[in-house]
Image (spheres, rainbow, N blue to C red):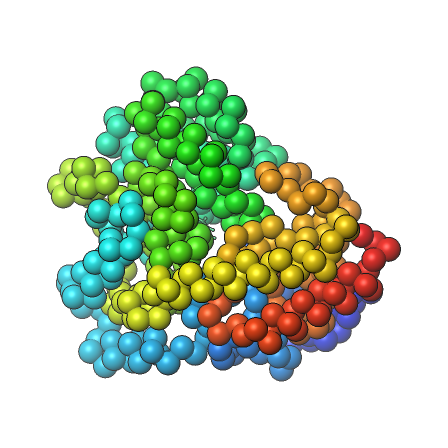
Amino acid sequence: AEARALYTAARPNSAALHEKAVAVMPGGNTRSVLAYGPFPTAMTRGEDCRLWDLDGREYLDLCGEYTAGLFGHSEPRIHDALHAVLKRGTNLAAVGEGEVKLAELLCGRFPSLQKVRFTNSGTEANLMAQTAARAFTSRRTCMVFRGGYHGGVLTFPLAGPSPATLPLPFVMANYNDAADATKVARDNASDLAAIIIEPMLGGGGCIPARPDFLQTLRDLADETGALLVFDEVMTSRMSGGGVQQRLGITPDLTALGKYIAGGMSFGAFGGRDDVMALFDAKLPHAGTFNNNVLSMAAGKVAMGEIFTPEAAEKLFTRGESLRARLNEVGKGLPFGFTGMGSMMTVHFRDPLPEAPYAASAEEESLRELFFFDMMAAGIYLARRGMVALSLPVADSDFDRFVAAVGEFVEARRELL
Ligand code: PLP
């Protein structure tokens, strides 16, 4: 309660904005992930990996726009690309060079991508991947995993179906549970169109899939005739060619999104030539902004010049070392971070989870306390305690975060 009161007192302008917002937007926001009590902090400006809120407070941005903000807030090469597009005009109602160049870049990097198409968001990319799988196999059921998130209408909470999830034929299996996945796939084999998985649960707590589990899914897809779909909307940053390249397990289709267009809105889906050939004629896939020139131009620079495979490898290694340092701080306590490379999430249990779990009320309140304490220290994370590193985050910022986490552990030790 004390941490909450401190948070509230320091942010009168965010509180006032929230009051106006709830009058015109249910929940006072247009992104459910930003709905948290007592009111969300409103940001007004960003530079590199710094953010400033409406009350003039400065933060180290470790939220990284939930992985979409990989390049920080002021990458000059991306800004130049965007300005150049603005000079040429933005809504051309035509195919253009930008989309071809970005498609070439992505197909050259992600092992599963023989052909690719663009969307406006990761949600749409997943919807289209499913549509493609259903059309290609002439089957309807998609297997998904409890704790998985593929977009607002494709949410699969542990506790049971989300009221927001599309009423499509889904069957659910347990994440990282090969025996359960095998049973569910075989029980539904005759109608199984796709097996869809995040190679690491992102929103579900940065819990990586075990490589042998993903290999089991690859084998099950082959056995049943279903398509294996990797939702790499968040995890594509884990190497030049995503987790699929890192592990050498190639899905039939892949969904991409988030940072790839340099911070502009983006999604993409693609994969096997024979599946994607459906879009030559049989399957329409329209969308006014699918090839919007801002996203295409920023993406070309972002992926071609900045987040090269070498840069991806370097960020992965730096993230691994940061997580190791953080877990040293909480050693022996029910406190630590799971994740992979530049993405990690805090958990209040020992040992750290290898599958999604139902958090206790105590764990939930510790998570809230962690968020408020980090905000008080000027460190901005996702409310759920997720970190997504951006390229401008420096080693000295790591030191600062590790120190803040150390202070949290010391100050709150009796609560852990
Ligand atoms: N898939 C995963 C794994 C995600 O984490 C997200 C967003 O957080 C999505 C899909 C949806 O992407 P978007 O928010 O761009 O619709």
The spot of residue 408 in percent (x, y) is 76, 64
In the image, residue 268 sits, relative to residue 391, either above or below, namely: above
In percent of width and height, residue 59 lies at: 61, 75
**Which residue is farthest left?**
281
Residue sitting nearer the eye, 126 or 71: 71
Q: Position of residue 383 (x, y in %)?
A: 62, 59
Q: Quadrant of residue 105?
A: bottom left
Q: Is residue 135 above or below residue 105?
A: above
* Residue 145 in view: yes
Which quadrant is home to the N terminus?
bottom right
The foreground one among 154 and 248 is: 248
Which residue is found at the position 52% from the left and 23% from the top?
179
Q: Could you tell whether 319 is left or right of 131 in the image?
A: right
Q: Is residue 124 above or below residue 251?
A: below
Residue 354, located in which quarter of the rendered image?
Answer: top right
The residue under the point 67% across, 56% down is 327
**Spot occupied by residue 303 in the image (x, y as percentages of width and height):** 32, 65
Compared to 167, does 413 lie above or below?
below
Residue at point 52% right, 49% down?
202
* Image-based side of 246 in relation to 294, left or right: right
Choose between 184 and 165: the one closer to the eye. Answer: 184
**On the rendered structure, is 177 left or right of 363?**
left
Q: Is residue 291 visible?
A: no
Residue at the (22%, 37%) spot, across then down: 275
Q: Quadrant of residue 129?
A: top left
